[in-house]
């Protein structure tokens, strides 16, 4: 296995200072959460019906968003990696856009497209499909901002796989779908799992697009990040800190468990 060479050269002092300051920018906010956390009241905060409802809704919507992202994102990644076509660069820009777009802007875009009077939403409303300010809207908003993580990770894996195994299966009479299920998917399974985990973690922490497109109705569309915001606005900082730590812990576990796999994929 190829490993990147690690330089043993002593870095200049200015580089070390810059690196330390950069690490400090990341570390200080996290230290603030940990040091100011009211650990004695953590269980009472987490066991409240409101917190449990928001957590349950977050889990449901983020898992649903991840399932949609896998169902639609894997075929999109395959097309991007394997099919040359005009406009592929433009499609990649569309895929990347939710990663750099302010989430609130994404929520507004969803609202104008799929709202009751949106360019598509007006027709959905006529057939009884209501997305804005419903749980379906929360799932769609999370899918919109989280799917790019899965698509890019899987696309990179598909580009780097040895296609000779797929070609060999085809020469043995396997159909394209069978080759995809029995050969391609097993080869990219680690990257698929990594992309799905990143997608789920991003969906779980989504705030801006959700509150703009799905609203902040307790027990209906109020996910855990929105519940944190409500508590912070109400001056209930203890609950906001504890629930923020829950989201932080989940994100940290995902990143540590994946190690450098998703970084190399991207």
Image (tube, grey):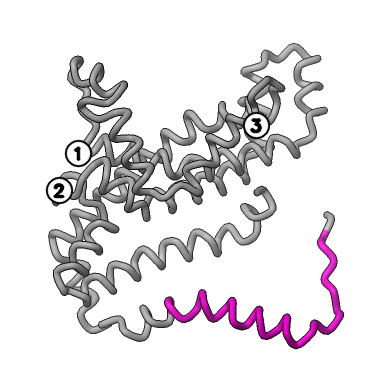
- Asked where in the image residue 257 lies, by quadrant, the reply is bottom right
Quarter in which the N terminus is drawn: bottom right
- Asked where in the image residue 166 lies, by quadrant, the reply is top right
The residue located at (82%, 28%) in the rendering is 164
Dot 3: few (<14), some (14–19), or many (≥20) neighbours within 10 Å? Answer: few
Instruction: Tell which circle, 2 or 1, labels the residue nearer the N-terminal end.
Output: 1
Q: Is residue 231 above or below residue 119?
A: below
Query: Which residue in the structure is indicated by mark 1?
Result: 133
On the image, the x and y values in percent for residue 244 come to 32, 68
On the image, the x and y values in percent for residue 202 come to 43, 51
On the image, the x and y values in percent for residue 25 come to 52, 77
Extent of the magenta region: 3-30
In this view, the residue in front, 31 or 196, is: 31
Dot 2: few (<14), some (14–19), or many (≥20) neighbours within 10 Å? Answer: some
Query: Which residue in the structure is indicated by mark 3?
Result: 89
Q: Secondary structure at mark 1?
A: loop
Q: CA distance from mark 3 to mark 1?
A: 34 Å
- Asked where in the image residue 30 lies, by quadrant, the reply is bottom left
Dot 1: few (<14), some (14–19), or many (≥20) neighbours within 10 Å? Answer: many
Q: CA distance from mark 3 to mark 2?
A: 39 Å
Asked if residue 13 lies left or right of residue 110, the reply is right
Instruction: Tell which circle, 3 or 1, labels the residue nearer the N-terminal end.
Output: 3
In this view, the residue in front, 37 or 113, is: 113
The residue located at (86%, 80%) in the rendering is 9
The residue located at (42%, 77%) in the rendering is 29
Whether 4 is among the magenta residues is: yes
């Amino acid at each position: 296995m190829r490993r990147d060479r690690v330089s043993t050269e002593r870095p200049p002092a200015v580089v070390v200072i810059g690196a330390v300051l950069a690490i400090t920018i990341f570390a200080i906010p996290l230290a603030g959460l940990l040091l100011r956390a009211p650990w004695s009241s953590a269980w009472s905060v987490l066991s409240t019906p409101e917190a449990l409802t928001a957590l349950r809704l977050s889990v449901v919507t983020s898992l649903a968003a991840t399932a949609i992202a896998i169902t639609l994102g894997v075929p999109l990644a395959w097309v991007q990696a394997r099919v040359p076509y005009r406009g592929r660069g433009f499609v990649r820009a569309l895929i990347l856009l939710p990663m750099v777009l302010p989430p609130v802007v994404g929520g507004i875009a969803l609202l104008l497209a799929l709202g009751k009077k949106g360019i598509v939403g007006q027709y959905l409303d006529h057939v009884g499909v209501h997305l804005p300010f419903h749980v379906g809207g929360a799932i769609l908003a999370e899918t919109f901002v989280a799917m790019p993580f899965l698509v890019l990770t899987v696309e990179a894996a598909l580009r780097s796989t040895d296609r000779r195994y797929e070609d060999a299966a085809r020469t043995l009479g396997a159909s394209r779908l069978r080759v995809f299920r029995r050969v391609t998917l097993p080869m990219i399974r680690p990257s698929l799992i990594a992309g799905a985990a990143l997608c789920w973690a991003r969906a779980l922490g989504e705030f801006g697009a959700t509150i703009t497109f799905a609203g902040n109705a307790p027990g209906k569309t109020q996910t855990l990040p929105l519940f944190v915001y409500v508590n912070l606005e109400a001056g209930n900082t203890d609950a906001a800190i504890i629930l923020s730590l829950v989201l932080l812990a989940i994100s940290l576990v995902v990143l540590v468990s994946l190690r450098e796999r998703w970084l190399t994929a991207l």
